[in-house]
Amino acid sequence: MSSSAVSSLRGKWALVTGSSRGIGQQIALGLAEFDCNIVVHGRTKRNTARTRRLLADFDVGSVVVAGDLGTAAGVRSVLRAVAALPEPVDILYNNAGVQNAWRPLWEIDRSTWQSTFDVNLFAVIELTNVLAPGMLASGMPMELVERPHPDWTLARLIQGFYGTPLDTGFLEAAKGLDRLGAEWRRAMEARLASATVERWQGRLYGPL
Ligand SMILES: NC(=O)c1ccc[n+]([C@@H]2O[C@H](COP(=O)([O-])OP(=O)(O)OC[C@H]3O[C@@H](n4cnc5c(N)ncnc54)[C@H](OP(=O)(O)O)[C@@H]3O)[C@@H](O)[C@H]2O)c1
């Protein structure tokens, strides 16, 4: 590993999902070699104990978060535990995964695909969405740059559009807003012209 990569790991905190054993455990130990602190993860705290013992050979910090990434509640509990850590996580290593589908494609039932994708894809998306550095993070300062229509709050627009969809006074006034999205303007004009609300089945159930 290059010297800049080594120094960029020093003192950082890495959450390695599925580091209780297998490849994830080796990844955790590999990062620890470069002085990276480790958030060890597995489904249970008991599973993670061996990785923590192995990490004790390195001069790094380690903590454990536990949670089943195959369930929404488990993902949430991992995120809550990470949020409660004294240091923020700098590196997210999405390693945890399952390979449930060992049979021919046509013999694999839906629940097997679902449980595989829950861990291998959806948990990765959710963890990444929350933990990866993005344009916004908690604690960032907010600055009001422009508010061209202070009377037209989002709450008022949403209430009018969905709550009183055929209120002509609302529709006439709202469709004239220069910042209104084109789809909403078209829907408002169509409502005014037809005095009916457009069909929503396509949005709920797909194209009819
Ligand atoms: N081994 C290979 O040849 C190979 C090849 C290609 C890709 N991969 C991929 O590499 C990754 C690691 O493989 P591995 O062989 O090291 O796997 P492994 O030995 O079976 O370890 C899997 C790790 O993921 C965790 N995990 C499994 N299901 C979980 C769940 N529902 N919620 C939270 N954690 C869960 C396990 O935690 P617990 O201790 O709590 O069970 C464990 O730490 C996987 O994504 C795998 O698909 C492996």
Image (spheres, rainbow, N blue to C red):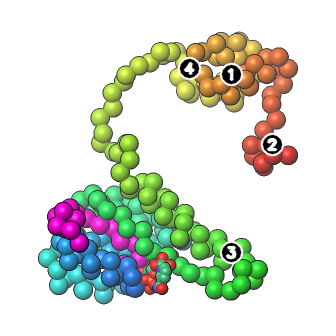
Where is residue 102 drawn, in percent x and y?
63, 86
Whether residue 167 appears in this view of the structure is: no
User: Residue at (64%, 71%) from the top-left corner?
Assistant: 114
The span shown in magenta is: 1-20
Query: Label 1 vs label 4: CA separation?
Result: 10 Å
Q: Is-magenta flag for residue 12?
A: yes
Q: Is residue 162 left or right of residue 196?
A: left
Q: Is residue 180 left or right of residue 88?
A: right
Query: Label 2 vs label 4: CA separation?
Result: 27 Å
Q: Is residue 187 left or right of residue 37?
A: right
Query: Label 4 vs label 3: CA separation?
Result: 45 Å
Amino acid of disc 2: Gln
Q: Is-magenta flag for residue 79?
A: no
Query: Label 3 vs label 1: CA separation?
Result: 42 Å
Q: Residues within 10 Å of mark 3 (few under 14, many from 20)?
A: few
According to the image, label 3 marks what residue? 111
Q: Nearer the viewer, mark 4 or mark 3?
A: 4
Q: Is residue 148 above or below residue 132?
A: above
Say which quarter of the image contains residue 100: bottom right
Q: Secondary structure at mark 2?
A: helix
Amino acid of disc 1: Arg
Q: Secondary structure at mark 4?
A: loop
Q: Secondary structure at mark 1?
A: helix
What label does residue 185 carry, if any? 1
Amino acid of disc 4: Arg
Q: Residues within 10 Å of mark 4 (few under 14, many from 20)?
A: few
What label does residue 201 carry, if any? 2
